[in-house]
Each structure stands twice: as structure tokens, then as C-alpha cells.
Amino acid sequence: MKISIITATYNSARTVRDTLQSIAEQSYPQIEHIIIDGLSKDDTLLHVKQFSHVAKLVCEKDKGIYDAMNKGIALASGEIVGILNSDDVYINNSVIGKVMERFVDDSVDIVYGDLQYVNQMDLNKVVRTWKAGSFTKNSFYYGWMPPHPSFFVRKKVYDRLGSFNLELKTAADYEIIIRFLLKNELKAAYLPEVLVKMRAGGASNASLLQRIRANREDRRAWKMNGLHPNLFTLILKPLRKINQFLIK
């Protein structure tokens, strides 16, 4: 069974080599790595072309990272699709193998695990740990969300239910997870270990104003799916991050 891993890049020369290396070193043999580059102006493509495992490379202007991810999903030929950002890495070389073991069960549509936020300059310095925990439908109403870089999906799910909604700027990953798990009740398997290291930072967490904007998008994500969060749901969502700083 083949897995397609999609990486969107744009001026990612500083970090993309770590991402490429972490995929090249995976012990699982059937990996299709797809790079979607938004016409980088730095040495991103120079790094990409040094890795022979890269199966597909697209270089063209896009409408942002979610558009790039959609292009990658459309090109994917694997039965399973994973998305690894150009500044993230898999924690070790057995991650994909462990994920694929869970997909041997044909009833499982989605596999997800935990994530560590790490220092921008030192991948071994853990800032906080996102322990996702097991999923129930009620989890979303209490602000739950699994980390998207550790979220693996069968390709047929994207084909049937669609990919990322480009109307959303920061919450398209939240919306698609709600669409898959809450609205359509797909079966997910939790892999209770850290799968991905993610450099700390992000568009939805950089400032109070951006957090307010992100909260509005989160609310739209529910509305788009004909669902209604509780009054406290979208307040609890960012508050749940506090506990991540207590787990190292």
C-alpha cells in the first residue's frame, strides 16, 4: 500500500532540507513524496532536487498553502495521504511504517498521533507537546482538535468529501477535520505517540489580533458544515494549548 506525502514550499530553503531528509530516511518503502512549490525565489528547489526520493515536483504560482495542498492531493496516487509542512519533520524513521500498520484495517479512514513544538533553531529543544488523545464526537464541543501534520487520510476520503476550503485562511485544516470526523463520522485510529516535530510559530497564534481572527474562522468552519458549537467551544480551543506547555 502506497502513501503520498505532500509538502508545500515557498522560500523554504532554511528548513526544507530537514523535511526532505526526514522523509528520505523513512523505513517504509512505498512513499510518493510530492513537492508543490509556489515559485520560490531562494534555494528551495536546489535542495529539493538533491533528493532523489521526490516523486513529483510542481512549480507554479498558487493561492496560498491550502491551495498548494489541494494541488498535491489531486496529484497523489497513494491510497493514503499525509501532509508534512516544509518546516516540520517526522520524529524518527519508523513513523510512516507505524501509521500504515493502522491502515491495514480497512474500516479505518484516518490515523492521527501527537506532535511536539520545537525551537526554530534547535529541533531537539521541545517547547510544548500536543497530546491529541482519543477521539469522540463530543471532543470537538470541548475545543478538541488533533494536530494536522500528524493527520493521515485515505485518498478516497478526499475524493468523496473534498479537500481544503480556500475561503478560509487559517482554519481550513480545522474545517476539514470537522467535516471528516464530526459531520461525516469517519472512523479514526489514534496512534498515542509523537509523530511530528513542528517548529514553533504559526499564523493563527502570533498575536492576540490574529487569534481573534482565527477564532472567527473557526466559527465559520462549523457554520460551513451546518454545525453549531457550544458557547464555550471556541474559547476552550486555544485554552487547551496551555496544557501542552506542561507536557515535555
Image: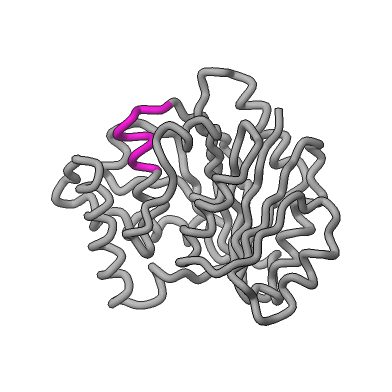
104 or 135, which is in the foreground?
104
Residue shown at 77%/64% (left/top)? 48
| Outermost residue toward the front in this view | 60
Q: Quadrant of residue 167?
A: bottom left
| Outermost residue toward the top in this view | 106
The answer to whether any part of residue 90 appears in the image is yes
Q: Quadrant of residue 89?
A: bottom right
Rendered view: 54 above or below 50: above
Residue shown at 69%/34% (left/top)? 98
123 or 171, which is in the foreground?
171
Residue 30: x and y, percent? 77, 36
Residue 42: x and y, percent? 69, 81
Left-right relation of 242 to 68: left
180 or 50, which is in the foreground?
50
Q: Quadrant of residue 217?
A: bottom left
Left-right relation of 242 to 222: right
| Outermost residue toward the bottom in this view | 41
Total number of numbered discs in the rendering:
0
Q: Which residues are magenta?
A: 177-186
Residue 90 colored magenta?
A: no
Magenta portion: prevailing SS class: helix
Rendered view: 103 above or below 16: above
The answer to whether any part of residue 87 appears in the image is no
Residue 181 colored magenta?
A: yes
Residue 47: x and y, percent? 79, 69
203 or 201, which is in the foreground?
203
Identify the image quadrant of the N terminus: top right
Residue shown at 45%/66% (left/top)? 63
Left-right relation of 27 to 106: right
